[in-house]
Image: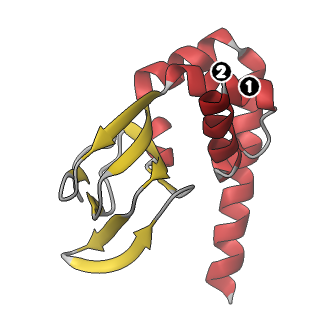
Amino acid sequence: MARQDAFIDHLAEVPLFSACSRKELGLVAKRAEAVKVDAGKVLVSEGATGTEFFVIIDGKARVERRGRKVATVGPGGFFGDLALLDRAPRNATVLAETPMELLVLGQREFAALIDEVPGFAHKLLAGLARRLRDADAKSVQ
C-alpha cells in the first residue's frame, strides 16, 4: 500500500492530473505498470509516435532534442503526458542515464479509465487548461 501511495503522490504533481482527487489518482495508478530499466535504455525517441506516459520513481533521464541535451529529469519528473491524449510524434528523445524505476501508463489503459469514470474527463480538461495557461504565460515573458 505504501508503494501505491508513493505512485499517487507522484501523479499528483503532474499538471494534467492536477484537478483529480486522490481516489481518481489511485485509479490511474492501478492501471499503470511499474517498470525497471537499465542505464542507457532509450525510453522514447524523438519523432516516434507517442502512446505512453512515464513518471520517474527513481533514477535520472536525459532529454535530448535534435541530438542535444536539453534537460535532466529525476524522481517525481514525468514525460509523455500529452501522448495519453493523442498519437502525435514525440518532441524529444529520453534516455535512462542511470538505472531507473518508472510508472508507465499506456494510452489504451488511460482511455478505458475515461470511459469508465465519466467525471474524470472533466478534471483532465481542467488540468490541461491549467497547463496551457502556464505555457501561454511563459511564452509572453
Residue located at (21% from left, 75% from top):
66
The answer for how far apart the CA atoms under marks 1 and 2 are is 5 Å
Say which mark, if any, is on residue 27: 2
Find out whether the residues at labels 1 and 2 contact each other: C-beta distance under 8 Å: yes
- In the image shown, does 88 or 95 lie closer to the viewer? 95
State the image coordinates of residue 47 (x, y, percent, origin top left): 22, 56
Q: Residue furthest front?
A: 2
Q: Position of residue 32 (x, y in %)?
A: 49, 27
Q: Give the residue at x 71% y 45%.
A: 12
Which element carries disc 2, helix, strand or loop?
Answer: helix
**Image quarter in which the C terminus is found:** bottom right
Instruction: Judge from the rendering whether residue 120 lies leftward or rightward of residue 37; answer left or right.
Output: right
- Identify the residue at image location x=22%, y=57%: 39
Left or right relative to 20: residue 64? left
Image: 115 above or below 17: above
Residue 3 appearing in the image: yes
Q: Which colour scheme appears in the figure?
A: secondary structure
Which label belongs to residue 37?
none
Res 137 quadrant in image: bottom right
Crowding near the residue tagged with mark 2, few <14, some 14–19, many ≥20 C-alpha atoms within 10 Å: some
Compared with residue 125, is residue 96 higher up or lower down, i.e. above or below? below
Residue lying at the far top of the rendered structure: 116
Which residue does the image show at 47% across and 63% down from the upper left? 74
| Along the line of sight, the residue nearer the viewer: 69 or 123 | 69
Note whether 31 is above or below 91 in the view shown.
above
Examine the image and state in which quarter residue 33 appears.
Answer: top left
Which amino acid type is marked by label 1? Answer: Glu
- Of 65 and 37, which appears nearest the observer? 37
Residue 41 location in percent, x, y? 19, 52
Q: Which mark is residue 24?
A: 1
